Image (tube, rainbow, N blue to C red):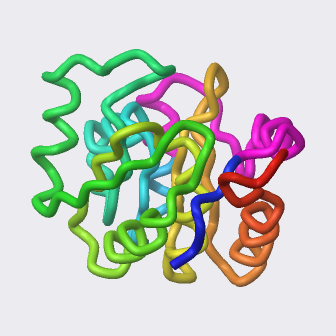
Amino acid sequence: MAPTLVLTPELRARLKRPLGKLFRGEPEEVFKRLSRALKGRKVITVGDVVSLNAIRSGLRPWAAIVDGRSMREPLPQHLASQVQAILPRRLRLVNPPGTISENAWGVIGEAVREGEALVLVEGEEDLLTLVAVICAPEGSAVLYGQPGEGVVLVEVNEDTKKAFKELVASMRPAGEAG
């Protein structure tokens, strides 16, 4: 099992930029374009709003990773339940803000391997995009929100997995002086 990893200031700055192709625009139009681009592929969504908008547009996630919040504010229960209604299996994960917890690899790995899974995160799901890309099968896609800009599409292949592993390797183990 990997140790809990903590975000560094350098990586925080790097993660402010999209890590894939940014789709800008209103959610309805963005997801219309994404649905055409993703036909027949396994899609993993990270974030409550992205997951909800994907489902509303008819794009059913293979797995969704959510924390019940949007921009750090609690999501209204009626919206959260729309995401939960679509994916029958529930997995739970504790992941404090600014970290990738040691359990994230196993829980997200199971979700993307077996599918039909909703990962309910107590804490924050932001950095779990990194884990999702590394765990996802090649040929799949990971979607996450870029605050104030749109939705980012990460095509999962050997190159993106390698790049995301390098990002994770730049994090520091929890408890180490930073």
Vertical arrangement, residue 63 with respect to residue 74, above or below: below
Residue 48 left/right relative to 125: left
Residue sitting at 26 percent across and 37 percent down?
56
Residue 10 left/right relative to 121: right
Q: Is residue 9 magenta?
A: yes
Q: Is residue 173 magenta?
A: no
In this view, the residue in front, 93 or 88, is 93
Q: How many marks?
A: 0
Vertical arrangement, residue 87 with respect to residue 83, above or below: below
In this view, the residue in front, 23 or 106, is 106
- The picture quadrant where one finds residue 39 is bottom left
Residue sitting at 43 percent across and 52 percent down?
45
Vertical arrangement, residue 39 with respect to residue 56, above or below: below
In the rendered image, residue 118, in percent from the top left (x then y), is placed at: 25, 55
- The picture quadrant where one finds residue 172 is bottom right
In the rendered image, residue 36, in percent from the top left (x then y), is placed at: 47, 56
Residue sitting at 51 percent across and 79 percent down?
1
Residue 13 left/right relative to 52: right
Give the magenta range. Answer: 7-33
Residue sitting at 52 percent across and 45 percent down?
33
In the rendered image, residue 34, in percent from the top left (x then y), is placed at: 50, 49
In the rendered image, residue 16, in percent from the top left (x then y), is placed at: 77, 35
Q: Quadrant of the C terminus?
A: top right
